[in-house]
Amino acid sequence: METAQFAYAKSLLKRHFGYDNFRPQQWEVISHVMAGNDALVLMPTGGGKSLCYQIPGIMGMEQGRGCTLVVSPLLALMFDQVRALPDEINARVLNSECSEADNRATMELMLQGKVSLLYISPEKLVAEIDNWSSRIKVNLIAIDEAHCISQWGHDFRPEYTQLSVLKRYYPHVPIMALTATADRLTRRDIVKQLCIQNAGMFIASFDRPNIHLSVERCKTGADKLKRIVSFIADEHPRDSGIVYCMRRRDAEEMAKTLQSYGIDAGAFHAGIPAGEKHQIQRDFVNDDLRVVCATIAFGMGIDKSNVRFVIHYNMPKSIENYYQEIGRAGRDGAPADALMLYSYSDVKALTSFAESSGQAGVNMDKLRRMQEYAEGYTCRRQTLINYFNEPFDHECGNCDVCDGTVAQERIDGTLLAQKAMSAIARTEQKADASMVVKILTGSRQADVIAAGYDRLPTYGKGNEAGYWEWRDYLLQMLHQGLIEVSYENSNHLHITAMGWDVLRGKRGVCLSKHQERSSVAKKPSARASREKPQPSASPLPSPQEDVDQELFDRLRDMRKAIAKASGVPPYVVFHDTTLREMAAKKPVTKEAFAQLSGVGESKCEKYWRSFVSVVQQHQASH
Ligand code: ADP
Ligand code: ZN
């Protein structure tokens, strides 16, 4: 039974979306709700949440089990999502921006069981549910951006709290709550408020392997500008991207500078009138504006999958912020770049913000972790993913540390790490980093003696390294996920499961030899070497190797022309990943075109002639 369902679901995936396989967790989620269970789904932005309810929606309609309701808080995004779906699957929108006539037509179709997916605002759903529950068959209720239901989440929406009525009206219909950001507290709140305490938890990896991560230190703002101009001009001469700036003034100046170098750029910040802001967003989504220089407000609620780079002109104030902002790059899974520039004046400015904020302690801790990330020489991805408490034990091969841009000397650090962790264990995990180092180096300071730590067997056993050297190694161990800082307990160090494995001799540790900060030199960009596909545990497609860049550009022009003519954003026609595959495989027949990932039946019918003729013309001219 299960296998028949699976084969059927896979055929829908190919027919309507043009994909050959589910991503990790997608099928698990789908089969779980199809069996009548509730689910909480955590996946990063771009992870593929939508398919988790779209496939059950299509199956539900085809099998006469009713329609799937998709509750979403962002009105504009609902229309975008429906527009991006092939017509034959009959998705509709119901919210305050639809006309009466549209609403009536939708209702009529719903009653006939002809709607697969109904995107609906929470207000509308709560208003209609009493009237509907006896008349309309529902197969599944999906709650997108589910963190909005919780006051603990960062984007609380009061109208979401009324969704607790769903289970009352539709007790037997599974609920699927989806979000990209929810810590443990928020997760608990979501299942409680939706009355789905027994929901299965599906947590996908937060890794985004296609985003190349790099950090560069600059002395002055002028150095940063120069670097950004050359980065965009040399490495992304035609791509869309975002430059995040801390201040409005910087965003405006950046846009002007880029324009003066012939780069099509605009500024976006809270001081710009609403109408103009909408226009900027629209232009960006439609590939009519290439680079947006923005303060953090930009990016929320836009669903553009072909952002190829995100640059930080300033260091962000926390790793959470940084991760959310770089997450806007490469949602289509094709290679993308995240470049962060930082300077000591950033650190100074952020420190004074943090200190004057209401929660100085927490904000300073977050800032410190951000700075340590910037200055670190542990694989960036390892550092990031471990920060979010997801074990990540290998080097990623797609960051500036892994590709050797950050100069460093690697050493076997197993013994050093074991010494440090045995000191941590002997204090019963009740010492902070500074104390642990004092124990290792045999310090006679009063606090060491008072705690009796001079009687520990590890006391003074770490003489091979000095104080700062040990601090550095502890930091690297933190970034590698061997130890954790317990912020709520006076910053005591704790050993993780991975750390215990090292302590017990079950795994080794590689560290970077400590070096003075000033000697951390940057080699010139190692771009060429990282264009090669990297070994990765990732479920996302690896970059295509032999993409013909000139053909890619021509295909992109065709995509833009088609998008313009049909009034949709270019990525709705095809994602960059599909165009890249096209530029590598160069299909000249309809059959070959249909094989490409991202080409479903209806898109194939609509577009194959246009794109195949571009390929043919290109072949003829070479
Ligand atoms: P999210 O809502 O989690 O941010 P989306 O649902 O928008 O992510 O999916 C991100 C991108 O990944 C989309 O372009 C989507 O078409 C693509 N995608 C999703 N599932 C698959 C799959 N199984 N195979 C290939 N691409 C996929
Ligand atoms: Zn790496």
Image (cartoon, grey):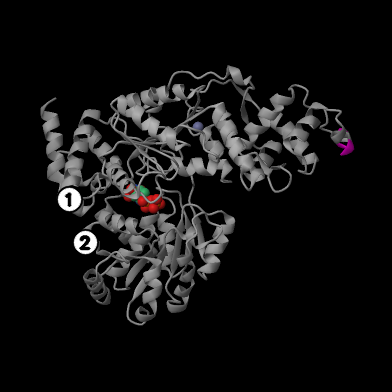
**Label 1 Cα crowd, 10 Å radius (few <14 / some 14-19 / many 20+):** few
Q: Quadrant of residue 49?
A: bottom left
Q: Quadrant of residue 12?
A: bottom left
Where residue 305 appears, x then y in whole percent?
Answer: 33, 44
First to last magenta residue range: 450-454
What residue appears at the point 26 percent right and 50 percent down from the top-left corner?
Answer: 18
Would residue 306 be counted in the magenta stretch? no
Of the pair 501 and 381, the residue shown nearer to us:
381
Residue 241, placed above or below residue 517: below
Of the pair 79 and 60, the residue shown nearer to us:
79
What residue appears at the point 32 percent right and 81 percent down from the top-left corner?
Answer: 135
**Label 2 Cα crowd, 10 Å radius (few <14 / some 14-19 / many 20+):** few
Left or right, residue 256 beside residue 439: left
In the image, which is nearer the foreground, mark 1 or mark 2? 1
Of the pair 168 and 72, the residue shown nearer to us:
72
User: Type of residue at label 1?
Assistant: Ser
- Mark carried by residue 566: 1
Where residue 121 appears, x then y in whole percent?
Answer: 37, 65
Q: Quadrant of residue 94?
A: bottom left
Where residue 223 appears, x then y in whole percent?
Answer: 45, 21
Kindly identify which residue carries mark 2: 88
Is disc 1 placed on a helix, strand or loop?
helix
